Image (cartoon, helix red, strand yellow):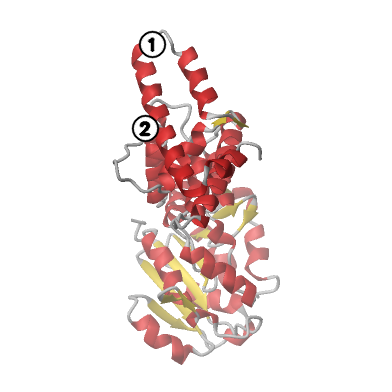
Amino acid sequence: MCRPGLVGLIVAAGYSSRMGAFKPLLPLGDKTVIEAAVDSLRLGGVTDIRVIVGHRAEELYPVLAGLQVGIIENPRYAEGMFSSIVTGLSTFAREAEAFFLLPGDTPLIRRRSIKDMVRLYHKTGAAVVYPVFNGERGHPPLISSRCFASILSGEGTGGLRRILAYFDADSVEVELADQGVLLDIDTLEDYKELTQFYVRRHIPTYSECLSILYKYQVSDKVACHGRAVAAVARRLAELLNGAGLNLNIELVVAGGLLHDLAKSKPNHSKRGERVVRSMGFSRVGGIIASHMDLELAADYVIDEAAVVFLADKLVQGDKLVSLTERFRLALDKFAASPEIVDSVLRRRRTAEAIWDRAASLVGTGSLEEIMVL
């Protein structure tokens, strides 16, 4: 949980003119955009959340009333976002240590991102902590009390960005595996992208997976292997879905990319599982945990974990290999270690069982075509 002196300020006072619809009340799954924005901060541990309203405020009051947030009306909302920031900040500037500034149309911030930003703020005492994804700053920045006086006395020319630029030398950026920090709603296409991100929010996107690999300093060799496994896993899943299964392609790809996340560590499958579960990706964690050893029931149905398990055994380094070749190499390498040989043989039997079950669904020829892609 965040310290009591940290406030979450959500700005939802604007006209939504570019969107052509009132953004805060647009549906997002079973919620509205403004409800999702409040959830993002609260799930990250922020307890003091305040929402600035203005345009069509009367429509927001009934929704906000049930969210246990402070509601602050900005009568000068027509002057732009900076006026709303000043209005909100003036209600807590004397007692707050820092505040998150979240535009109401950027509602999908992962809880881990909020926690990581707070942790870095406490560690560094930075004037501003900026969330970054793929090298690009996003929202919400965490702005310390060192900036409050400058904001409150600012006339608004150049907006908040110009004021915060004076503090750049004392500010820090934190690279996050969170594409949501860049996703706002300016157009209908933006809204469609945001709704798609919401539906699959418990599975990291391809770009987020690459960001996770970078964050945990995975070697180029391991990252290349992960990309190759993800590509094979995707093709396997697409073939199997064509035969009537209902595999989640995004889950398969994420599992393939991240399965060796902790490759350099002992018991790397369990360590990798813990890392991604801590980010909120529990289903991907399950795939990572089982990519080395997968127990199959006699009547099992091929699932995403089985697809990634098989794909991993069809890739040596970043090259496609047959199961025969892959396990021959392993058996030769560990021939002097009976315990390891037993493990290799067990994994070979599992991989062969998945291959045979897949072949019964799509045909051996279709599976073998994967090997020449």
Q: Pinpoint residue 66: horizontal percent, then vertical percent.
A: 32, 80
- Name the amino acid type tagged 1: Ser
Which residue: 58% across, 82% down? 14
Which residue: 48% across, 23% down? 327
- For this orientation, the residue located farthest to the top is 336
Which residue: 50% across, 41% down? 258
The residue that mark 1 highlights is: 337
Q: Pinpoint residue 92: horizontal percent, then vertical percent.
A: 43, 70
SS at mark 2 in the image: loop
| Quadrant of image for the C terminus | top right
261 shown above or below 198: above
Any mark on residue 293, and which? Answer: 2
- Name the amino acid type tagged 2: Asp
Number of other residues with Cα within 10 Å of mark 2, as a class: few under 14, some 14 to 19, many 20 or more: some
Q: Pinpoint residue 62: horizontal percent, then vertical percent.
A: 37, 87
217 shown above or below 17: above
Q: Is residue 371 visible?
A: yes
The answer to which of 91 and 355 lies nearer the viewer is 355
Proximity of marks 1 and 2: CB atoms separated by less than 8 Å: no
Q: Is residue 176 visible?
A: no
Q: Pinpoint residue 288: horizontal percent, then vertical percent.
A: 42, 40
- For this orientation, the residue located farthest to the right is 158
Looking at the image, residue 280 sits to the left or right of residue 146; the answer is: left
